[in-house]
Structures are given as C-alpha cells and as structure tokens.
Amino acid sequence: MITNPETKKSLRTIVATQCIGLLVSQLFVNGFMLAYLSRLGVPSYQIFFLLALLPFGGMLLTVPFAYLSDRFGKKRVGAYGRFVTVAGLILLLSAGFTTEAATITATGAMILFSIGNTAGAASWFALLSPIIPQEIRGRFFGRLRIAWQSCSIIFTWAVIALMNRFTQIGFYQYILLVMIATSLVHIHLYWKIPELEPCRTTAGKFRSALTQTLKTPNYLPFCAYTFLLILFTGSIPLVIGLLGKDILLFSDAQILLVGNSAAIGALGGFYIGGKMVDHIGTRPVFLICHVSFAIVLTLIALRGICPFPAITTVCLLSGLFGAVAAASGIAFTSELLAIIPPENKSLSTGFHLSLMSAGFALSSLLIGQTLKLNVLNQNWTFLNQSLSTYDTLLLGSAAMIILMLITIGLIPSIIQVHKAQWYPQSR
C-alpha cells in the first residue's frame, strides 16, 4: 500500500504519460502503418524493410543515448527525442502528398521517428526505477500496461469504425495529424515525471561505464535470451498482417481488427503476467510463455482446421499471441529491473533495449529478404492444409522457438531459483 502522496502523484503521471504517448506507437503494430504504406504503393517486402528501420535505430542508438542520459539527464535527452518523433510524423504525413517519391519520404520519416523514439525510450526504465516501490513493480507494470493498452484499443476501434466509411489516403493523414497533437501532449506530461536520480556529470568514459555494466552478474545471459526470443517472435504481428492482406484478402479495417485483437489479448496477458510475477516469480512466466509462443504460431499456420471463418480464427489466435507476448514482457521488465546495477541505470537498461531492437530489426530484415528473394514455396500442403509463404515463416519460427528451449537456462531466475524471488510474495 503506497502512502506517500508524492509517489502516488508520480505514478499517476507515469500512467497518463504512457496512455497518451503510446498511441502513436500502436500505429506501427496494429496494422495501421501496414495499410498506410500499402496505400502509398510500397511492396510487401519493402514494408518489412521500412518498419525494420525503427528497431534498427534502436539497436544502434539506444546505448549512446542511454549513456548521454546518465551524463546530462534522463528527461532532457528523452524530451529532445520526443520532439524528433514529432518531426518524423510530420514527414510521414507528407509522404501521402508525394506519390512518386512516397517510399523515399517514408524512409526519411521512419529514420527520424526511429532516432527520436530511441532517445525517448533509452532512459525510460531507469527514470522509473527509483520512483516505483520494489514490492509493487510487477503489479504496477501490469496495471500500467493495461491502462495504455486499453486506451490503444479504444483508439483503434474508433479508427476501424471510421475506416469502414473513409478509404481515401487523406483519412490516414488525418489520423497522423491527430497523433502529432497527442505527441505534443505526451511531451508535456513526460516533463512532469520527477527525475529522482541526478545525472552523473562526473561519470567515467563510455567504454569503462559499458564494461562495468556488462560485468553485472547474470546480466549478459539474460540479454542473450531476450535477443534470441525476439529474433523469432518480433516480426510475427507483421507476418500475420501480411498473411491477412496478401493471402486471406482482408480489408484494411479487418487488418486493424486483427491487430486490435492482439491488443485486447495483451490486456489479459498484462494482468495475469503481473500477478504471476509478484506471487510466484518470473520463472513460471518465462517457461509458460516460451512454449506458448510455439503453440500459437503453429495454430495460426494451421488455421484451416478450425471451423470458424478465417477472420474469426485469426483474430482469436492473434489475441492469444498478444496475451503471451504481454505476459512475457511483464516478466522481462521485472527481471531487468532486479538485475541492473545501481549505477549507470540508463546504460544498463539501454543496452538491453538495444539487443531487443536488434532482435526486432534482424527479424524484419531476414523475413523481408526472404520474401524479396522468393526462396520459399508460395503454395504447399501440410496435414491436408493449403499453406503459403507466410505460413512457412510461422512454422519455421515455431520450430526455432522449440529448439531454443535449451537456451532458457540463460535466464538468471531459471538457474538460481531462490535468488529469483525478486519481489515479496503477497500474503
């Protein structure tokens, strides 16, 4: 039970900041950006490359921005970054007016958005670490993600309803205009979050600070497992979206419906994941989610065995995938905050985020290159089901996740069960 009024106020500000700020991020995962880029005439394989620019920027820039955050202030670097994301959104909106150079304009917009988003996210967890009491971290992150995910779901439902009435490119631009306005509100709220740990203006050189961070016990094995899991799951929402667009011939509104189903499923995953982390630790969450990822991907590929219409089946399974990913994310966040050292928090969380971004980027680049080279059979049969290239990608990812069971011992909570009880058990 939190009794400090300043802490309560700070936690409310954090929730409001995320609810407003993450609306724009949802455009890149709920199918909106897939539909917008398709309307601009961008081929499917190039969409993978364009969307890979976001995590690619995170892979390269998270650690430098995290180091700058520790040196010059987390909020200062984060706020500057969020202004750059606004510039990226403006350029992305203008891509709709440059039909002949739409891909080039969109590429520039993605690069700007990636740089700004990385700067804003690099120190986020380090900024929150001293604010959130340790005994409620799992529950708070669960409730926080439920809050912003609920706002995202409502927003996406509104977009779907309007998309059924307005199909012109101008509609997508109006949505981006709204996102520019919400991003400015987000910057205002972000600046109200207190920065309890002052910047270390006398910090050592970047190399020595990074070396000290990497020597943290259990840190590197945990980062390695995170990277490998995201490598085989990070691009799955986009694969599902393109499966609906190119194979199942879903409309733009239906593509967003599939993405929103994942967001709805994530609500349950956030709640259950937060409860499990606080009550029984991260170990069961990691084990269950790891196996569940492989099962869900297999079921999506073999969706033909289900008697329901394709849109219903894909929405249900997309929701299940969202739930598993959400519960896994809660466990990752809780474990990370328990492992990081007291010094150079932005750098330690930033390095972990850079490896996550590397997983997302490489996942998108590999799939995009596979589709571009057309090395997979476009039509084949398995268990009397007619499958496509996207189904091959889903089954291949599921197989690799199963093989990855041998690497789950890299997680500290799997190796050291007793030390893994990072959070007090509720009585």
Image (spheres, rainbow, N blue to C red):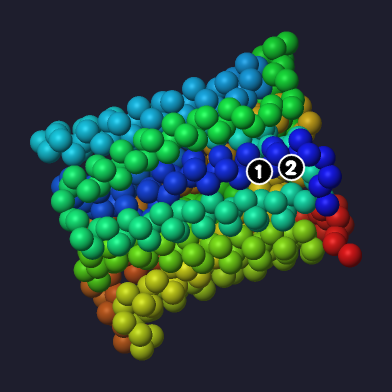
Q: 253 or 70, which lies in front?
A: 253
Q: Position of residue 185 (x, y in %)?
A: 47, 34
Mark 2: few, some, or many residues within 10 Å (few <14, many ≥20)? some
Kindly give the residue lying farthest to the front in the view shown: 5
> With respect to residue 323, does 168 lie above or below?
above
- The residue at which mark 1 appears reads as 12
Kindly give the residue lying farthest to the top in the view shown: 202
Q: Secondary structure at mark 1?
A: helix
Q: Secondary structure at mark 2?
A: helix
Residue 382 visible:
no
Q: Position of residue 179 (x, y in %)?
A: 37, 40
Q: Is residue 10 left or right of residue 366?
A: right
Question: Which residue is depicted at the point 49% across and 65% down?
Answer: 264
Q: Position of residue 175 (x, y in %)?
A: 30, 45
Q: Residue 109's quadrant in the figure?
A: top left
Question: Which residue is depicted at the point 34% across and 31% down?
Answer: 88
Q: 32 or 106, which lies in front?
A: 32
Q: Position of residue 60 (x, y in %)?
A: 48, 30
- The residue at which mark 2 appears reads as 8
Q: Residue 331's quadrant in the figure?
A: bottom right
